[in-house]
Amino acid sequence: MLILGLNMFHADASAAIVQDGEVVFAIAEERLNRHKHYGGFPSLAVKACLDSVGAKVTDIDHVAIGQDSDANLAKKVQYALSNPTKILNFIRLRQ
C-alpha cells in the first residue's frame, strides 16, 4: 500500500510517502523551491516523493492531509508580523 502524506497551506509545507506502513521518504517543499517556510501546495515535494519510489500519482492508494490550519496560529501571526514581506502570503493562506 502506498500513502502520500501532505502538510500544506501553512508554513513549512511538506510531503511524505509511506510504503507498507513505513515512511520511506519525506521532504519539505522549501528544500526544493528555496522559499523558506513555504506555505502553499508542496508540488515539488510530492514529485520527489513519487520519484523516490518510482511511482505515479495513479499508484497512490490513499492521501493523508493535515487539516488544522490554526495549529500554532500565534507563532504564525508573530512570524508574519516580524516579516512584513510575508504578510500578504499569510493573509492569502488564511482565506
Image (tube, rainbow, N blue to C red):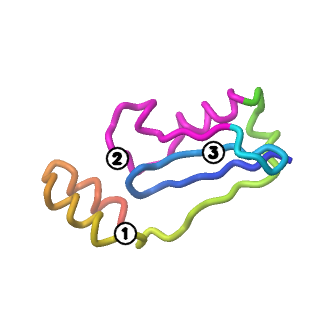
Q: Nearer the viewer, residue 44 or 31?
A: 31
Q: Quadrant of the C terminus?
A: bottom left
Q: Tags 3 and 1 in contact by the CB under 8 Å rule?
A: no
**Distance Cα–Cα, label 2 vs label 1:** 14 Å
Q: Which mark is residue 37?
A: 2
Q: Nearer the viewer, residue 62 or 71?
A: 71
Q: Secondary structure at mark 3?
A: strand
Q: Secondary structure at mark 2?
A: loop
The stretch in magenta equals 25-52
Q: Residues within 10 Å of mark 1 (few under 14, many from 20)?
A: few
Q: Residue furthest front?
A: 22
Quadrant of residue 49 in the image? Answer: top right
Q: On the image, numbered disc 1 is attached to which residue?
A: 72
Is residue 14 on the magenta stretch?
no
Q: Which mark is residue 16?
A: 3
Q: Secondary structure at mark 1?
A: loop
Q: Measuring 80% from the left and 40% from the top, which residue is drawn there?
A: 58
Image side of residue 12 versus residue 84, left or right? right
Q: In this picture, is 53 found above or below 21? A: above
Residue 40 screen position, x and y as percent: 43, 49
